[in-house]
Image (cartoon, rainbow, N blue to C red):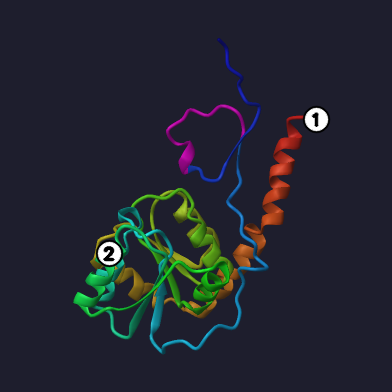
Amino acid sequence: AGFNIPNRLTSVTKSHLKPFKIQPPVDIIRNGVDTDKYSPGETQEKSGKFEILIVGKHNQAKNHSTLIQAASELKDTKLLIPSDGPLTEQLKTQANRLGVDAEFSGRVTENELIQLYRRADLFCLPSENEGLPLSMLESLSCGTPVLVSDVGDNDVIVEESNAGATLKNTEAKHVRSGIKHTRQQGLESMSDRARKYAAGNLDWEQIANRYGEAFGSVHR
């Protein structure tokens, strides 16, 4: 039995391609975001603390526990932790034991999630593995700077957007240091760059057009 060799390939990340020996041209076309919906805007009154948002299922891979540990030695810091999962109760217990101000909001609607992105001063995702997390892109689109682990293509997005930093090591002490360092870099200007990058590179209409061009090229 034979198999067909594609004329052209697309991938959302370069990291996905590393295990393969790819011959045809490859178009790196990122995940897209509805940048009209996921946008900066007014939000509810903040707590007065530095608010850090983490978005993801409460499981081992997303590494919520490390962020909670890191926040335990940060003053005037509040964690925003939506969603749920197998580790939810364990994470609540950890936050309470360490005296971390953590708002566990459970499953939220899309509009509620957008409000959390807008409310947060920083998005932090010290996950153990990723391809290209949509939550990071949504955060950028809402104008929220990001601090993410150096996995998948996270480093590429951070470098292109100049709106955050990557963590080479996701131990709690390094996450804590990353948060402190990012806070010192000028969050307001990073916020502006985050939104500008998302609007110019991640909008779904642009992404759809790129797919159209890629597929159209093989039928000419």
Label 1 is placed on what type of residue? Arg
Q: Residue at x 70, y 39 (%)?
A: 214
Residue 14 visible, this angle: yes
Categorize mark 2 by other alpha carbons within 10 Å: few (<14), some (14-19), many (20+).
many
| Residue 66 visible in the snapshot | no
Q: Is residue 18 magenta?
A: yes
Q: Position of residue 173 (x, y in %)?
A: 24, 67
Q: Residue 220, which numbered label?
A: 1
> Please, what is the three-letter code of the amino acid marked with disc 2?
Ser
SS type, badge 2: helix
Q: Say which residue appears at 73% left-offset and 30% top-offset.
A: 218
38 w.r.t. 46: above or below: above
Question: Nearer the N terminus, badge 2 or badge 1?
Answer: 2
Q: Is residue 123 magenta?
A: no
Judge whether 93 appears above or below 7 on screen: below
Element class at badge 1:
loop
- Image height of 177 relative to 5, above or below: below
Disc 2 vs disc 1: which is toward the camera? 2
Q: Which residue is mark 2?
A: 65
- Most prominent secondary structure in the magenta stretch? loop
| In the foreground, 94 or 161 | 94
Q: Which quarter of the rendering shows the C terminus?
A: top right
Instruction: Identify the image quadrant of residue 66.
Output: bottom left
- The quarter of the picture where the N terminus appears is top right
Name the spot of residue 219 as percent of width and height, x first: 77, 29
Which region is colored magenta? Answer: 15-25
Determine the image quadrant of residue 180: bottom left
Q: Position of residue 56 (x, y in %)?
A: 42, 60
